[in-house]
Structures are given as C-alpha cells and as structure tokens.
C-alpha cells in the first residue's frame, strides 16, 4: 500500500456510556467511494445500570451498515422492523426518502454487565435513488462469504470483490472486506479492488514500505489497484471503498443528499414531526444547529 495519500487518525467522541471513534468524514476527505461516515463504537464495558439508548432519529439519502464485534443492539424502525443484531451479522437499513430508527440495549441485557464493540457505517445512495422508498435487510453471520487463503481469513461483508458477492443489497459498486491473520503475511489484493479504497486497522498493525501503522488509523490509497501491504501477526483490518459518485454529497446531521433542498426539506419535516414514527417509541431528538457541510 505504498500509494497512501492520506492517513486519518481516529477522533474519539463521548456519546453517553461509551466512546465512538469518528473515522469519516474528515476535513481533507469527505468520502471514500460511496462511504461517507464511519464510526468505531467501543469497545465499551457497560455495567448492569448502563445501557445503549439511541432514541428515534431520522435519515435520508443513505444506507446504514451496522457490524458488531461484541455485544448486541435492538434495532427498531418506522417500517415496523424490530430485530436484534449480534456479532458478525449485518443490519442494512436504506433510508431513501426518509426513515426513523432507534438503537437500544435489548431488554434481556439491560440489568447485566455487557460489552459493546462494532462499526457503524453510512453509504450514500446514487443521486437517482436518493428518494427511493425506505427498506431494511438483515443478513446473518453464516450467510456472509468467508474464506481462507494462504493462512489469511477473509470476509466480504458487503459488495463485490474477489469474484464473490455479499447478499447485502447494496445500490452502487462497492466493497467492505474483513481481513484477519494470526501470522505475519504479505497481502496483495489490488487486482480485486476498484475505485477509491481505504484501510482501517482495528487491531495489530500493517507495514507499507518502511512505515508501520497501528490501530485507530485509516489509510486512504491514491490508487486502489496498488493495494499491497504486510499484515502483522494477530491483526484485523477492514478494506472499504468503491466507485465515487460524480456529484458531491452533502451531510447535515443524519441527512445525506446531493441536493441541499432535500436536506432543507428533511430538516423542516423533522422539526414539524411529520417523519414516520417508530412503533412504541415516543422520544423526540431536536434538530441540531450545525450547517450543511
């Protein structure tokens, strides 16, 4: 991966009972392919009186991907979905013209000690699909393509690569790949990638040229087809990317769109509480103040 153009350090933010490490967006890089937002949740040790409680909030113009390493989250949305996500599975929620969801510790875990650790990702929709009807898909861990090559374990969590296709129903050419190794190995996967590409180091380290990179860093390539690096023993990394969109996508709060007018409409609709409701949920999160960026 000698074609590294940018190194992004994880920036920690406290969102209640645990820390989230913001990876994208970054002032020098707003997106990698269609990926516009990546949060690293935890790892957080929650006691018997601490729980994750993210009340109902809206989205437009994107798909969210939740992938847990440890713990459990109960997802509820305005489509009537109520489903628990566990480690290794994928929750893929497409907001389209508008959806509302909450994320909470499941009831059976709320009075016991627990862990929470994972990634939450936003993938922008192509311009022509930004106003599509919302939908939700859940893919179990056993249905994610997984294989081993030269002692290295791979998972294709979403998208297409290596001649394989994940069952996660994506809407543009992309890939999200897990690579794990218990031994030091050379990885050369550029021929299987396309578009823009980023690498996130979860644990362990990688070496590119004479440089060693440690956890809590994202490396952005200048040319994904030259993606080559040495992975250290007991390391886990994630490769994400794909074809970038021809038009810029704007972000305000939980709203993503290539059209600022759609974001303004979403702001108005949320303030006036005309978004669809999540069954059984009554909390309301006010619209924040920051500008579209």
Image (tube, helix red, strand yellow):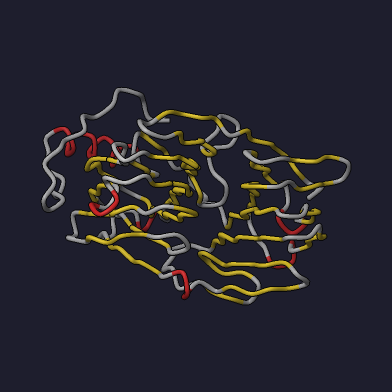
Quarter-wise, where is residue 45 in the image?
top left
- Please identify the residue farthest to the right as the structure is shown: 210
Q: Against 177, is 270 above or below?
A: above
Q: Nearer the viewer, residue 243 or 15?
A: 15
Q: Which residue is more in the foreground, 215 or 160?
A: 215
Residue 183 visible in the current orientation:
yes
Q: Quadrant of the C terminus?
A: top left
147 to 254, vertically: above or below: below
Residue 283 vs 3, above or below: the answer is: above
Q: Residue at x 46, y 53 (%)?
A: 70
Residue located farthest toward the top when viewing the structure as drawn: 289
Q: Residue at x 38, y 30 (%)?
A: 292
Q: Judge left or right: residue 139 versus residue 78.
A: right
Question: How far from the left and from the top, in percent, is residue 208?
Answer: 82, 46
**Residue drawn 50% across and 64% down?**
158
Relative to residue 131, is residue 210 depicted above or below?
A: above
Q: Position of residue 206 (x, y in %)?
A: 76, 48
Residue at 19% across, 59% down: 79
Residue 103 in view (yes/no): no
Q: Position of residue 27 (x, y in %)?
A: 56, 29
> With 7 as the anchor, is 57 left or right in this view?
left
């Amino acid at each position: 991966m000698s074609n590294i153009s940018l190194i992004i350090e994880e920036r920690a933010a406290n969102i209640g009972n645990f820390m989230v490490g913001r990876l994208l967006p970054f002032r020098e890089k707003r997106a990698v392919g269609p990926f516009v937002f990546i949060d690293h949740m935890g790892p957080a040790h929650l006691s018997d009186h601490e729980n994750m409680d993210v009340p109902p909030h809206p989205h437009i113009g994107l798909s969210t991907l939740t992938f847990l390493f440890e713990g459990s989250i109960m997802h509820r949305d305005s489509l009537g979905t109520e489903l628990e996500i566990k480690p290794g599975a994928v929750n893929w929620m497409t907001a389209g013209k508008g959806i509302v969801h909450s994320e909470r510790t499941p009831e059976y875990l709320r009075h016991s000690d627990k862990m929470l650790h994972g990634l939450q990702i936003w993938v922008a929709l192509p311009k022509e699909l930004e106003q599509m009807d919302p939908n939700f898909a859940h893919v179990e861990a056993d249905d994610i393509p997984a294989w081993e090559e030269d002692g290295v374990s791979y998972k294709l969590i979403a998208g297409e690569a290596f001649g394989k296709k994940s069952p996660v129903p994506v809407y543009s050419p992309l890939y999200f790949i897990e690579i794990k190794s218990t031994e030091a190995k050379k990885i050369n996967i550029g021929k299987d990638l396309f578009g823009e590409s980023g690498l996130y180091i979860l644990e362990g380290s990688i070496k590119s040229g004479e440089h060693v990179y440690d956890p809590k860093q994202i490396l952005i390539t200048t040319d994904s087809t030259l993606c080559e690096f040495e992975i250290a023993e007991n390391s886990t990394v994630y490769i994400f990317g794909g074809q970038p969109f021809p038009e810029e996508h704007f972000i305000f709060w939980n709203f993503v769109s290539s059209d600022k007018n759609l974001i303004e409409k979403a702001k108005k609709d949320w303030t006036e509480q005309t978004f669809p409701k999540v069954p059984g949920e009554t909390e309301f999160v006010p619209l924040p103040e920051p500008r579209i960026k």
